Image: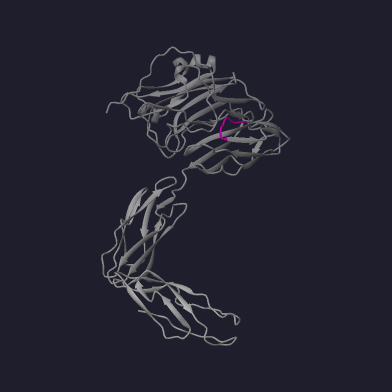
């Protein structure tokens, strides 16, 4: 396949600015955050008289396959002059259109302005594929005319032309900004700063669930390895608050996230800690936040089911149990039950679905039966949900039922009469039930009516024949 990365000549006005050093992963940067790092592999040393410097540019890209990239650099010590620059075999092969290392492709202009670059592009070359480790892209060689114990050399990124915009370019012409750790400063081996900033941690991570309360605050400590230092902290993170933002070492810093309204995703940024008196200023605390979708939640309708049938007759009509996801990501549900007379289909599904609930009364005598449908998803916030199922199987013949099989009547000895009692006779089975009543007690005066068709209320009247305080009498009224 023909691959092409075009370098256009564009007349633009560019601000001369360093690349942002904060820890932020570009949305076009896939996998782990890609990085550009400049390493001093050879350094000057006043004691030994070593005046040469070698800076190696290393790039880590694990997932993106690159078709080009540009980045500008500047150094601050005018005693240093660049002798040469060499692109690595990796970039020479990958970027066959060319690699560009000097300002305006001229080492004299590079030294006059104290700035250089890396630029690479391809026409037919393979580009740079992702790798699990950082890879060398170029080396830059300097010599200093003067070097003392108190001297230093600082390097930072700088965009000073259209060809030095800080970016990598992957297939599909996706531009993105890799992570740059910030200004690199080298001191002589004998240099002893008055103090350095010391952070108790270099990273914080927060986990949150969308729509739920924000995570608890975390903290870190800013201290000094020498004299007390005054420091300031900078961050431009809308979802984060730090307190206090400045102070004297040693100081505890509270970091409070606010995830209200934040969409699901991973967020990366950093807090920059600076002190003008520290030898290692600035320092960074990387901050990452993962907002996860809320867990699924099982919804069911109806929440209880009733079936009725007659023994020996037809099975009751099927019913539908509707399952819904009332929460976050996918609900993978299953349904189960114990009793053989209850059938379910299907036994599993995703998010919203209907389960046909059927009943087979074959072999069941009349009576009441109970089972439970269990709807499950181990990831659901309310797992499991249980739906009771009640089955009532009636008899195919009439069944005599009364509302009160046992009746207790207390009669004061001073009373000469007893109030009548009403009972309800009903058919608990099928068909029509005609009944009649019989009794052989001297204490039952009348039954009105003494025959009829259920359901029917019957008034039973009593008479007092004899008896003393504390006597108990038992009589029976027969229903046929």
Mostly what secondary structure, the magenta segment? Answer: loop
x, y (%) of residue 197? 66, 35
The quadrant in which residue 181 appears is: top right
The foreground one among 182 and 299 is 299
Q: Is residue 465 left or right of residue 174?
A: right
* Res 230 visible: yes
| View extreme (top): residue | 11
Say if the magenta span includes residue 201: no
Judging from the image, the colouring scheme is one colour
* Res 200 visible: no
Residue 171 to residue 452: above or below: above
x, y (%) of residue 66? 38, 30
The foreground one among 241 and 269 is 241
Q: Which quarter of the figure is the N terminus placed in?
A: top left
Which range is magenta? 234-239
The foreground one among 464 and 279 is 464
Residue 308 to residue 24: above or below: below
x, y (%) of residue 263? 48, 37
Residue 67 to residue 213: above or below: above
Q: Which quarter of the figure is the C terminus placed in?
A: bottom left
């Amino acid at each position: 396949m023909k691959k092409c990365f075009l370098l256009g000549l564009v007349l633009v006005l560019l601000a001369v600015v360093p690349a942002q050093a904060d820890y932020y992963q570009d949305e076009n940067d896939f996998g782990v955050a890609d990085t550009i790092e400049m390493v001093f592999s050879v350094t000057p040393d006043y004691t030994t008289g070593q005046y040469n410097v070698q800076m190696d540019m290393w790039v880590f890209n694990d997932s993106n396959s690159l078709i080009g990239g540009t980045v500008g650099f500047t150094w601050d010590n005018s005693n240093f002059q660049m002798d040469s620059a060499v692109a690595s075999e990796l970039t020479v092969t990958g970027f066959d259109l060319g690699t560009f290392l000097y300002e305006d492709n001229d080492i004299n202009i590079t030294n006059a302005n104290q700035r250089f670059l890396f630029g690479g592009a391809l026409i037919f070359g393979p580009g740079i594929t992702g790798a699990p480790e950082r890879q060398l892209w170029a080396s830059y060689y300097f010599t200093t005319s003067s070097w003392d114990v108190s001297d230093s050399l600082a390097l930072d990124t700088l965009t000073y032309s259209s060809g030095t915009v800080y970016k990598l370019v992957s297939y599909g012409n996706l531009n993105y900004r890799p992570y740059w750790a910030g200004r690199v400063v080298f001191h002589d081996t004998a240099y002893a700063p008055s103090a350095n900033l010391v952070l108790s941690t270099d990273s914080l991570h927060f986990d949150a669930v969308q729509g739920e309360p924000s995570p608890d605050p975390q903290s870190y400590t800013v201290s000094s390895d020498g004299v007390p230092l005054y420091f300031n902290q900078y961050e431009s993170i809308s979802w984060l608050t730090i307190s206090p933002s400045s102070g004297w070492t040693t100081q505890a810093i509270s970091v409070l996230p606010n995830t209200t309204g934040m969409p699901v995703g991973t967020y990366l940024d950093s807090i920059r800690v600076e002190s003008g008196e520290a030898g290692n200023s600035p320092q960074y605390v990387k901050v990452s936040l993962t907002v996860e979708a809320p867990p699924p939640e099982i919804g069911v309708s109806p929440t209880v089911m009733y079936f009725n049938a007659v023994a020996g007759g037809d099975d009751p009509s099927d019913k539908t149990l509707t399952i819904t996801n009332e929460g976050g990501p996918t609900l993978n549900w299953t349904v189960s039950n114990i009793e053989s007379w209850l059938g379910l289909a299907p036994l599993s599904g995703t998010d919203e679905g209907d389960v046909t609930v059927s009943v087979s009364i074959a072999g069941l005598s009349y009576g009441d039966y109970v089972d439970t449908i269990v709807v499950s998803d181990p990831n659901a916030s309310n797992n499991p949900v249980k739906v009771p199922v009640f089955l009532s199987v009636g008899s195919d013949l009439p069944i005599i039922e009364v509302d009160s099989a046992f009746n207790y009547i207390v009669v004061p000895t001073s009373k000469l009469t007893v109030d009548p009692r009403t009972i309800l006779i009903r058919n608990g089975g099928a068909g029509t039930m005609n009944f009649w009543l019989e009794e052989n007690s001297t204490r039952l005066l009348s039954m009105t009516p003494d025959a009829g068709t259920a359901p029917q209320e019957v008034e039973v009247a009593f008479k007092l024949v004899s008896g003393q305080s504390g006597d108990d009498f038992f009589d029976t009224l027969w229903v046929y």
